[in-house]
Structure formats: C-alpha cells, structure tokens
Amino acid sequence: MSQTKHQIAIQGIKGSFHHQVAIDYYGDAIGLEECASFDVLVEHLIEGNVDQAVMAIENSIAGSIIPNYALIDQNNLSIVGEYHLSIDHNFMVSPGQTIMDIQEVHSHPMALLQCKKYFKNYPHIRLVEAEDTADVARKIAAENNKNIGAIASATAAKIYGLDILGNSIQTIKNNVTRFVIVSKNQAAIEKDQINKASMKFILDHQRGSLATVLNVMSDCLLNLTKIQSLPVIETPGKYAFFVDVTFDEYTQFQKAHSILKIMALEFKILGEYQNAKA
C-alpha cells in the first residue's frame, strides 16, 4: 500500500514483524519510531510524535493480545486499517557458522515455543528466552557472536547480515498475526471503501442481552468476525465486549449502529476501515 511519507511507530526495532508490516503497508518511504513497548508506542501517538502506529492485536495460534484492546480503548485511539502477516520463524547465525558451532539459540518465548520441535534434532543447542526476536539478531551481528543463533524474521537476517540455516522452522506453518493501524483520529476514508468496523459496548447485566445484540447485527446483515470480552475494572462482574464486523454496504453498519447505541449502556466505535482479508 503506497502512501505519502508517514512517521510510523512500531513495537520493537528494525527487522521485527511490526517493521515488516510497516514496510508492507506503507512502502519503504517511511520514518520509523522504534518503541520498546506498546505503552511507549501509544505515548508517541498521543503526543503527536508520529502519524500512525502498527500494533499486533491477535495471533492465529496464541489468540488475542488483550492488553492492546485496552490501550486502544482507554486512549481513545482509532483503528484506521489492518494487515495480516504470515509469521515465518527463521533460524539465523553469524556468517559462515554451521549448526554444530551454535551452543544457544535466543528468541522471544513464543517463537521458541513454536519452533521447539525443530531443535529436538539438535540436543546440543540450549534455547534461551529473550525479549525481542529482532534485537537478538542485531546483537549477534554487532558482537559477531559465533556461538549464539537467533529465531527471527527473514527481514532481520537481511538487515543485520546473518545467514539463515533454517527457513520457516515453526511447527505450525499456518501462523498469521493480525495487526491494526492506529491513529489519534479517525482517518478520512470514503464511505464506499469502508466494509469493516471495530466496536466496544457494555450491556445491562440481564439474561439474553448479548443474544439480542447479536440478533440485531444479523438482521442488519453484519458478519461478526471477532468478539472479545474484557472485565470492566470499575464494576466487578460486568464485561465490555470488543467486536469486529464486516459488511457489504456502509448503510448496513449505520443502521446497526443507530440501534446498538440505544441498546447498550455504553457504545463506542473504535474504527471504521477497509477489510484486509487473511
């Protein structure tokens, strides 16, 4: 997706999967703000240091990244787009090293878990948890470490000049992460281009209240693609529902919106954008 130059915040550093999404979504002509955490990413967005940010929201294996739903909601951010990235974990080392030279492999705990089966064939290698996949690759290159390998993206190997000894080594090959593009304000998207929306609502704690809302969505021809509940911290026993829906016509969503905001105790649109099919 080619756009004019943006200043974009990502969680992690160059070579991370967030970086790959930024490249795929915006193109190469972007300014990059590398953030140590999602909290820092949101701070940059709120303070106006960046135009938009890339934020992982769910993974096909690990499920929803629940704290990020709360960050978007609590900071009144808008989802203005989405991107689905196939996650391929690659085993990389310093140039010229063989697998027998490697004593340890460092990576994020989730990456290690997803690639554990691959390393059962190499019992001499110890798996070590690290905070960030791309940062391990960067450190190996910077220190010219001959005994430590990394599990990271192919982009990281290219950026930091590492050799890939194993491509796509994760056990489950169909591993997709959905990322959302978030902004301080709702983007100006033509209504005929909008076919997906993210919403949050809180319902009265009565029998059948959620079923009634789902029926309204169905009657208005909305397709429910995601529903996630989070407890309302201020009110124990009450839950907020985060919902994604797709639709063929924007007027279908408008109709549902007008009904749901009356039915719900609290109703909020988190974003209206174009559906990026996985």
Image: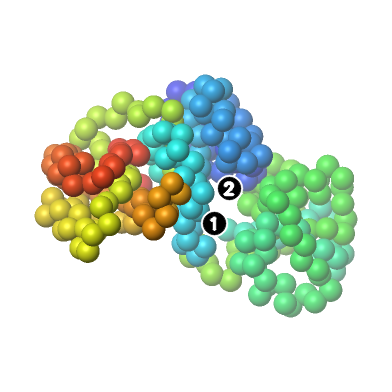
Residue type at numbered disc 2: Phe
The reply to whether dot 1 and dot 2 touch (C-beta < 8 Å) is yes
Relative to the observer, which residue lies in front, 77 or 136? Answer: 77
Note whether residue 84 is visible.
Answer: no
Tell me how the rendering is colored: rainbow
Q: Give the image location of residue 224, x and y in percent.
A: 26, 56
Marker count (numbered) = 2
Q: Measuring 71% from the left and 57% from the top, which residue is drawn there? A: 107
Q: Quadrant of the N terminus?
A: top left
Q: Give the image location of residue 242, x and y in percent.
A: 35, 50
Please give the label number shown on residue 87. 1
Q: Quadrant of the C terminus?
A: bottom left
Q: Measuring 45% from the left and 23% from the top, which residue is drawn there? A: 4
Q: Is 82 situated above or below 63? A: above
In the visual, does 245 lie left or right of 175?
Answer: left
Relative to the observer, which residue lies in front, 169 or 193? Answer: 193
What is the spatial separation of the Cα atoms under label 1 and label 2, in whole angstroms? 8 Å
Residue indicated by mark 2: 17
Element at label 1: loop
Q: Quadrant of residue 269?
A: top left
In the visual, does 71 lie left or right of 191?
Answer: right
Q: Is 59 situated above or below 123? A: above
